[in-house]
Amino acid sequence: MKIAVWTLGGVVVLLVLAFVALQMWFAASVRPVEPFVPTKEEREQLAFYSQPESWFATHLKGPRETVDGQTLDPKLQYMVEQRRPAAPWVMRSAPLIFATPWGRAFIRHGVDREWRLFTKVTPEMAQVEDRTVNGRGGPIPVRIYRPKVEGEGPLPVLVYHHGGGWIFASIASHDRVSRLLANEARAIVVTVDYRLAPEHPYPAASDDGEDAYLWARANAASFGGDPARVGVGGDSAGGHVAINIAQRQIKAGKPVPAAMLLFYPGAGLPQEDPSYTLFGKGYALDSAFIEFILPRVFKDYGRDRIREADAFMNPANAPSLAGLPPAIVATAGFDILRDSGRRFAERLRTDGVPVRYANYASLTHSFLQFSAVVHDADTASTESARLFGRLVRDSANARAILAPEAKRE
């Protein structure tokens, strides 16, 4: 009996020591993302995925994947094929890793580096400036990107919110995305480092986003922006933040943003959409991850209560979207959020809001982060940004600018 007790106690001690060692390894693995200097391994990854699409098309594990009449880009198919074997282990270990500050820092650090690495490098800015906004929940870091635009007065402004499921990513992960958007839209981009869950659950991200937007309107002249032409935008969870900002202005009786730029936005709970089933496993963002993050972000979330969500948590099902700003909604074909983005765009149109909806059929979720290596991702990023630049400059003529509808099959 004594031997058995000692053995059990020894196992517990070993498990505790292993856990402590793992946390120490997590902490030691985190390095500053900025200034961003790719490691040798990262440079090799970038060079590998910079090869022509034809190479990847001939080195796939299986035939080209076609789902719902859409064919996946060969590079993206190669990437998901490489990651699928590890996906079940990652999801099983995610709650344990994410349960500690060191584990969360490790995951967030990795995302920041990977997303930045595969985003296209665009021309230098005229100015990049870090500032801090005094928000209701504390200081909010923002970064202001002013592109080199000659012969134009105060520039339009895009207040942009990064994706990452409300739990990771940052200004650093989206630095190259922000530069690309600023250059292509010929607009000042203000990126918002909103608070992340689970440390700061909903509505912290939307509060920070709104505070940064109101600050940008009030202070646009101080960084060369036009306070009358301030739009909002975001990708994935950041798209949800941007939509919430506009909804809140309507509720408060305040001026809405001039325009919205939304990439594969979290525009509505997707569980009842066909795309949630079609792409729920094995394509970048999957259903297991959705069910992992939502309870950590929305404290009242329950898989059996999605129809009870209010208009701010589930905008696509809001009683009305009338009065929202004209919008550009870009979705990815192989994405569980494809249909919720489409539903949101259709609701906007039904409620009289000018909207351009484009589905980029060959792409997966988070395509903004692959513009350096995937041609269609570059196309989707740049043409959406250019259209936003036109729209925010002349939102009074939004219907003409946003029509005809983009057709992407």
Image (tube, rainbow, N blue to C red):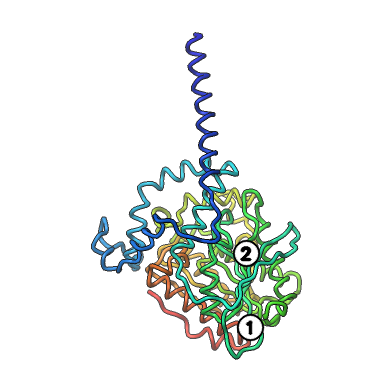
Q: Which residue is outermost to the left?
A: 58
Q: Secondary structure at mark 2?
A: helix
Residue 15 location, x and y as percent? 50, 28
Q: Nearer the viewer, residue 171 or 87?
A: 171
Kindly identify which residue carries mark 2: 241
Three-letter amino acid code at disc 2? Val
Q: Nearer the viewer, residue 111 or 166?
A: 111
Kindly identify which residue carries mark 1: 155
Query: Residue 409, located in which quarter of the rendered image?
Result: bottom left
Residue at 32 percent of width and 59 percent of height: 78
Question: Neighbour class for label 1 at 10 Å: few (<14), some, many (≥20)?
Answer: many
Camera-near label (2 vs 1) is: 1
Residue at 47 percent of width and 52 percent of height: 287
Residue 292 location, x and y as percent? 53, 48
Question: Neighbour class for label 2 at 10 Å: few (<14), some, many (≥20)?
Answer: many
Q: How many discs appear? A: 2
Whole-number angstrom distance, CA of label 2 to CA of label 1: 23 Å
Q: Is residue 277 left or right of residue 172?
A: left
Q: Secondary structure at mark 1?
A: strand
Q: Is residue 104 above or below residue 393?
A: above
Residue at 48 percent of width and 13 percent of height: 4
Q: Is residue 182 left or right of residue 92?
A: right
The label shown at residue 213 is none
Q: Which residue is outermost to the bottom?
A: 151
Residue 124 location, x and y as percent? 53, 75
Residue 331 visible to an observer of this rendering: yes
Query: Residue 326, located in which quarter of the rendered image?
Result: bottom right
Q: Is residue 77 above or below residue 390?
A: above
Q: Is residue 106 above or below residue 344?
A: above
Q: Which callout, 2 or 1, points at the residue further toward the start of the chain? A: 1
Three-letter amino acid code at disc 1? Leu
